[in-house]
Image (cartoon, helix red, strand yellow):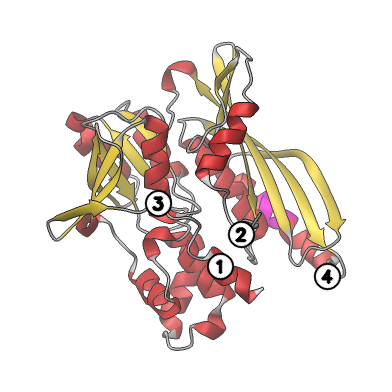
Amino acid sequence: MEPFPVGKLPAELMEQVLRRTATGDPRLLLGPGVGLDCAVIEFGDRLLVAKSDPVTFATDQIGWYAVHVNANDIATTGAVPAWFMATLLLPEHRTDRGMVESVFDQIGRACSAVGATLVGGHTEITAGLQRPIVAGTMLGEVDRERLITPSGAKPGDHLLLTKGIPLEATSLLARELPDRLTAISPMILERARHFLIEPGISVLTEARAAALTGAVTAMHDPTEGGLAGGLWELALASGVGIEVEREAVRVMPEAKAICIALDIEPYNAIASGALLIAVQSDRSSEVIAAIEAKGVDVVDIGRITSGAGVLIRTAGDMRALPRPDRDAIAALLEIED
């Protein structure tokens, strides 16, 4: 059999293997599934929300990333991130004291930023690795009546998108492939590198503001596979269709320049920092106002429908938005390694 490429496994395979390992635990309110990023477990009056995600792309801020990408998924459920565990796999012959201290300092600063505490994990030097890998697990909690899941979107809902795309990919590429981007001005590249911090890949502020309105039916942060992948995951999780207006989606100017230079599709590139929010149709303006009051950009990009799949309208022409087989930058960074 032909091996799979770097990136997420095919959705069909994931659905198949997850069905084989389904659990009957009655306290598991939300278990594994395509587009379902968090587990939700009954704990009396409160619900425990758990998320595990690794950071495998090469980055000089891997510990900082690991905390934020896990905290983001916790926030999409309406929960508050509280406890973080990290498994650090470090490359042989390349790991020194400076690398270890740097990663732990990043984890500490990021945990402080999201209000979480590092409570445990594992660290080792692993044979065969070319770069560090951090696999994080974030735990949070939420009141039962405030739980939001990716499966709650309903036909007629409006679909909002915060900030723009693809923030994480733009920052990663500017940091990791500067030699391929010499035709782009240093000022643009510096702004792109800084996307980690401003506008930032954390979505906690906007997720919390939206959740407190009580008008949100579903939230999902587009990570690997970018906005296109996130839209498909949300549609599948909720069993709905999605129609998007291309002109409403903000592709960051720095992202356009870098994606053109590297010949990648911005809709398919890892997009942490943006947040998809399905809201009740008659309360979309209320949610937009709540998010903007926190200083975060947000736009209405489309509608939830009773159909299936994802459609995108460009200059009046509605067409299917293909689901990406893999993230647009996965092959690029794989080649560079």
Disc 3 residue type (three-letter): Arg
Q: Is residue 51 left or right of residue 34?
A: right
Can residue 286 be seen here?
no
What mark, if any, has residue 94 been given in the picture? 4
**Mark 1 vs 2: CB contact within 8 A:** yes
Location of residue 191 in the rendering, given as x and y in whole percent from the top left corner:
44, 72
Q: Amino acid at mark 1?
A: Ala
Q: Which residue is mark 1?
A: 331
Q: Residue at x 33, y 30 (%)?
A: 153
Q: Which mark is residue 6?
A: 2
* Image quadrant assignment for residue 25: top right
Asked which secondary structure carries label 3, the reply is loop
| Residue 275: % across, % down | 39, 46
Tell me if label 3 and label 1 are in contact, CB under 8 Å.
no
The amino acid at mark 2 is Val
Picture coordinates of residue 294 (x, y %)?
A: 35, 45
* 254 lies above or below 230: below
Q: In 3D space, how far apart are the residues under numbered discs 3 and 1 (Cα atoms)?
A: 17 Å
Which contiguous range is marked in magenta?
104-108
Q: Seen in the image, is 181 located left or right of residue 293?
A: right
The mark lying in front, picked from 4 and 3, is: 3
| Upstream in sequence: badge 4 or badge 1 | 4
Q: Earlier in the sequence, mark 1 or mark 2?
A: 2
Residue 22 vertical position relative to residue 307 in the rendered view, above or below: above
Which type of secondary structure does the marked residue at label 1 adopt? Answer: helix
Judged by depth in the image, the label closer to the viewer, 2 or 4, is 2
Q: Residue at x 50, y 37 (%)?
A: 34
Q: Within 10 Å of the Cα at label 1, are there few (<14), some (14-19), or many (20+) other Cα atoms?
A: some
The residue where tag 3 is placed is: 323
Name which residue type carries label 4. Answer: Arg
Q: Residue at x 45, y 61 (%)?
A: 269
